[in-house]
Amino acid sequence: MGLQNPTSIFQMMNLWNKFKQNHPKFPKFMSAVYQNGIKEGSIVEINVTTADGQSLNSNLKISAEDMELIRQLKELMMNP
């Protein structure tokens, strides 16, 4: 999906809005994480349990370069 295309951006926003309707706690969680000080050096851990019970997990340390993406994701979540 090429996000430089206005139609693609509109489609992505529609998908995001539907996601927020289906999972209203997630944007609130991400907003709380951001507001409470996610910054360079923070560790983000992700755990996914598949439908068949397999557990997949990973973590990453936030770099200075990551902070712009985090800022833009926050903006996307806060402005429907």
Image (cartoon, rainbow, N blue to C red):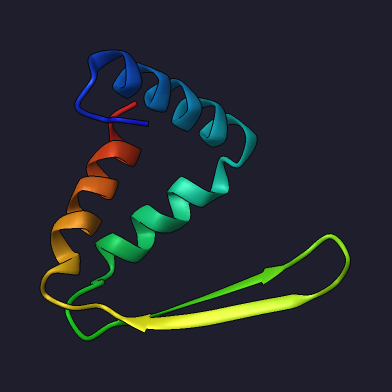
Q: Residue furthest top?
A: 7
Q: Residue furthest right?
A: 52
Q: Position of residue 22 (x, y in %)?
A: 64, 34
Figure quadrant of residue 79: top left
The quarter of the rendered structure image containing the C terminus is top left
Depth check: 57 or 2 in front? 2
In this picture, residue 38 sits left or right of residue 64: right
Image-based side of 60 in relation to 54, left or right: left
Residue at 59% over, 80% down = 57
Residue at 55% over, 26% down:
18
Q: Is residue 68 above or below residue 18?
A: below
> Looking at the image, is 47 positioned above or below residue 19?
below
Tell which of 50 and 19 is nearer to you.
50
Quarter-wise, where is residue 32 in the image? bottom left
Q: Position of residue 42 (x, y in %)?
A: 28, 82
Which residue is rendered at x = 28% and y = 62% of the image?
34
Task: Say which residue appears at 24% left-offset and 16% top-offset.
Answer: 6
Q: Is residue 36 left or right of residue 46?
A: left
Name above or below for residue 62 compared with residue 6. below
Give the percent coordinates (x, y) of residue 63: 18, 78
Q: Nearer the viewer, residue 73 or 50?
A: 50
Placement of 33 over or under 79, stated as above or below: below
- Count the labels in the image: 0
Furthest-front residue in this view: 2
Q: Residue 66: horizontal and vertical position, in percent?
A: 19, 67
- Look at the image and tell me in which quarter the N terminus lies: top left
